[in-house]
Amino acid sequence: MRIDLHTHSSVSDGTETPAELLATARAAGLDVIALTDHDTTAGWSVAEAARPPGLTVVPGMELSCRWLPDDRPPISVHLLGYLFDPIHPGFAAERARLRDERLGRGERIVTALAAAGYPVAWEQIVERSEGGVVGRPHIARALVEAGAADSVDHAFATLLHPRSPHYVSKADTDVREGIALVRAAGGVPVFAHGLATKRGRIVGDDAIAAMAQAGLLGLEVDHPDHSADERAHLRGLAGELGLIVTGSSDYHGMNKTTPIAACTTAPDQLEAILATGTGSAPFRD
C-alpha cells in the first residue's frame, strides 16, 4: 500500500485542482492520499466527489503556526491536522482568521513590490487564485510571469524571502493552541517537516517534546526537505515520545519540483491515525 499524507491543490498553493490532484495520485500508483491545503477545508467536498475508485482520501489541512521561544523571535512552524470536524466552531473561527491574515499580508507584500517597480497587481493575483487561499506562491507565480523571477523557487529565495525588504510577516497560530484546536475538533495533529533547515529557523527537540505534552500525536519524518540524518533523528525522537511517524511528498504540482509520492507513510502508521481521528472520516469505497 502506497500512502502520501501531505499534498496541496489549487484551493491553496498547489497548481492542480482537487480533481486533478487525485487523478495524479492514482496515476502514480497511490492507494491513499491526504488533501492538506493551507488553512482551509474548501477542497474536501470537491475531492470527495471527484475521488477515483480505489483511492482513499484522508481529509486534512496544514495549519500555519508559530513557536514562541522565551528569548528569541517566533519561529514559523506548520501543523498537519487529519480527520477533524470542519465545522467545529473554535477551529473554524481560527482558520477564518488565518485566511484573512494571509490576504492582508499578501496585499501588503504586493504593494511593496509594486512600489519598488515590480510589475505585479494584487487584483490580478486574487483573480487567478480562483477563490482559493492566496499566499506567497501566488505572488511568486505572478513574478515569474512578469519576468521578475526565473522560477517560483527563485522568487522565494530572493524577493519573497524573510530577509527581503518586501517581506511581511503574519500572525500565525501559537502551535500549542493549534494542537489543542485540532484535538478539540476530533483530529490528529502531526508536526510537519520539523527539521527542514533549508526552509529557515527550526525548533529543537525540547520544543517538540513540549508539543507532545500539549497533545501532538505525530511527526512527519520522511519528507523531501529532510536529510537522511534528520529523518533518523526524528524517527528516534518519535519513538522516545510515543508519536506516530508519517512520510509524504508535500506535493504542490508545478509550484515545486518534488513529485507526488516522493516519500510515503507506513500502513500501520496510517491505521493509527484512522483509529484516533473522530471528527471526520476518510473518503473511500
Image (spheres, rainbow, N blue to C red):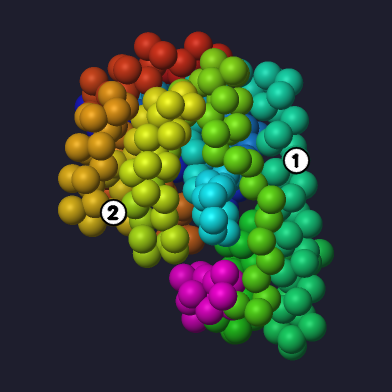
Left or right of 282, for residue 138: right
Figure disc tally: 2
Compare residues 37 and 98 and report the one nearer the observer.
98
Percent x, y of residue 215: 46, 24
What's the residue at 50%, 11% (across, down)?
278
Label 1 neighbour load within 10 Å: few <14, some 14-19, many 20+ = some
Residue at the spot of label 2: 226
Looking at the image, is 123 positioned above or below residue 260? below
Q: Nearer the viewer, residue 203 or 244?
A: 203
Left or right of 174 on screen, residue 27 = left
Mark 1 or mark 2, earlier in chain: 1
Q: Quadrant of the C terminus?
A: top left
Please identify the quarter of the rendering in which residue 33 is found: top left
Q: Residue furthest front?
A: 71
Q: Is residue 183 left or right of residue 109?
A: left
Give the magenta-colored segment's residue range: 150-163
What amino acid is at disc 1?
Answer: Arg
Residue 279: image location, x then y, percent:
55, 14
Q: Quadrant of residue 256?
A: bottom left
In reply to whether residue 162 is colored magenta, the answer given is: yes
Residue, far bottom: 117
Q: Is residue 30 above or below residue 146?
A: above
Does residue 69 appear anywhere in the picture? yes
Does the magenta segment cover residue 3?
Answer: no
Tag 1 residue: 97
Secondary structure of the residue carrying numbered label 1: helix
Kindly identify the residue that appears in the image at 68 percent across and 66 percent down. 168
Q: Could you say whether the residue bearing mark 2 is in a helix, strand or loop?
A: loop
Residue under the point 31% across and 17% down: 271
| Residue beneath the point at 79% across and 73% down | 111
Identify residue type, mark 2.
His
Does 211 appear above or below 123?
above
